[in-house]
Image: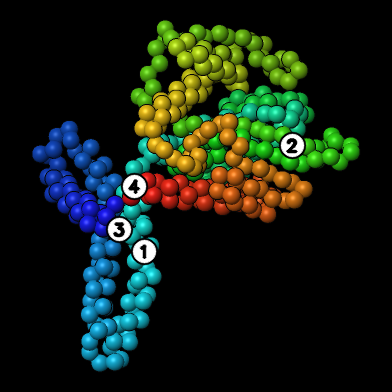
Amino acid sequence: MSAGVMDAKLDRLVRRHAELADALADPGRLGGEFARLSKEYSDLSPLVAKIEELKKARAEREELVALAGEGDPEMRTLAANELQALDKRLPGLEREVQLSLLPKDEADERNAILELRAGTGGEEAALFAADLLRMYQRYAALHGWRFEVMDVSETGIGGFKEAIVSITGRNVFERLKFESGVHRVQRVPATEASGRIHTSAATVAVLPEAEEVDIHIDDKDLRIDVFRSSGPGGQSVNTTDSAVRITHLPSGIVVQQQDEKSQHKNKAKALKVLRARLYEREREAAAAARAQARKSQVGSGDRSERIRTYNFPQGRVTDHRINMTLYKIDKVMSGEALDDFIEALIADDQAARLAEAE
C-alpha cells in the first residue's frame, strides 16, 4: 500500500471516528443503532489514538528538519539529535498503525476447546499427551484462565489416549490457536531398559468456542446414545446410563462425554464441543474460499502438520514453522517459556499478513 493511499485511509478513519462521536453525543436519535455504533466507536478509538500519535510525530519531524537546516549551530545540533531519536521511533509507530489496520480474526477474543490425542508411539505417546495437557494447564494458570477438563480417556499408567478441555479467559484463542498440529517428542521412556531414545507424537487441536447464536443445531440432525460410564480397564465409574454420545448426522462428527455423573451435564458438554467443531469447519471453509496463497502454514491449524519437536536428551524445543529453538525444555513444559514461541508465531503471522496487504 503506497504512502498516499495509506494516509488517505487513515484520514477516513479519523473522520469516521469524529462522526461517531457526534452521533453518540445524542443517543436518543440513534434508536436501535446505538449499540452497533457505540461498538464501532470503541473499536476505532485505540487506532485513532495511534494515528494521532503518528501524525504528531510526523509534524514534529518536519519542524526538526527545518530547525536542523537553519539558525545558530547549537540549535542545529540540538534539532539534529532530536531528529535522529525521532527517526528511530517513527518506524515503530508506523508498524503499530499498520498492524491495527489488519483484519481482525473475530475468533481471537473467544474461549477455546483444546483437544489432545496420543499419536504414533503407543504408551509413550499417551504419556507425552499427558505432559502436554499439564503444560497447557500451567500456562493457563499463569494467564489467569480457567482450565476445565471436560473428558479424558486414560491408559491406566498416567497417560492419556485423548483429552478435551475448556479454557476460559481473555483472548484465549488468540494465544493458543498456533498450537494446533502434531507435537513430536524425542526421549528415553521410563519403561525403556536399554536407554534408547524413542520418537512419538501427540496431536493438538485448538478450536474457538462457539455460542448457540453462532451455530444452530437442529435436534433432527442429532443421534443421541446414552450408556454407562467406565474408567480404565472397564472399571465402573457410574452405575447409571449417564454417559452421552452425540452423532451429528449431516457432518458425521461424533462427540462423547462421560466425565459428569449427570446425563444432562454430559449432554451439555458434548453439545459445547460439537458446536466448536462445527464452527471450526465453517471457519476453515471460509478460509479456503478466500484462497489466501500463504506460503507459511503458521496459524493454518493443519492438524497433520508437524509443528514442534521436544528433544529431552538435548534439552531443546524447536518450532519448525519459524525455525526457532529454545534450550530450556523444562521452562517450556512448565508453561513459563511457552509465550516465547507464541509471541514469535504471532509476530511472524503479522509480518506475513502485512506483506500480503502491500
77 lies left or right of 330: left
Q: CA distance from mark 1 to mark 4?
A: 17 Å
Q: Tag 1: residue type?
A: Pro
Residue 59: quarter of image:
bottom left
Q: CA distance from mark 3 to mark 4?
A: 19 Å
294 lies left or right of 241: left
Q: At 69% from the left edge and 16% from the top edge, which residue is drawn?
A: 230
Q: CA distance from mark 1 to mark 3?
A: 13 Å
- What x and y, as percent, mark residue 13? 21, 50
**Disc 4 marks which residue?**
357
Most extreme residue toward the left, as rendered?
29
Neighbour tally class for label 3: few under 14, some 14-19, many 20 plus, Cα within 10 Å:
some
**Disc 2 marks which residue?**
199
Q: At 14% from the left edge and 48% from the top edge, which residue is drawn?
A: 19
**Disc 1 marks which residue?**
91
**Disc 3 marks which residue?**
50
Residue 191: quarter of image:
top right
Q: Secondary structure at mark 4?
A: helix
Taking depth in this image into account, of 215 and 137 the one nearest to the observer is 215
Q: CA distance from mark 2 to mark 3?
A: 48 Å
Q: CA distance from mark 4 to mark 2?
A: 40 Å
Q: CA distance from mark 2 to mark 1?
A: 44 Å
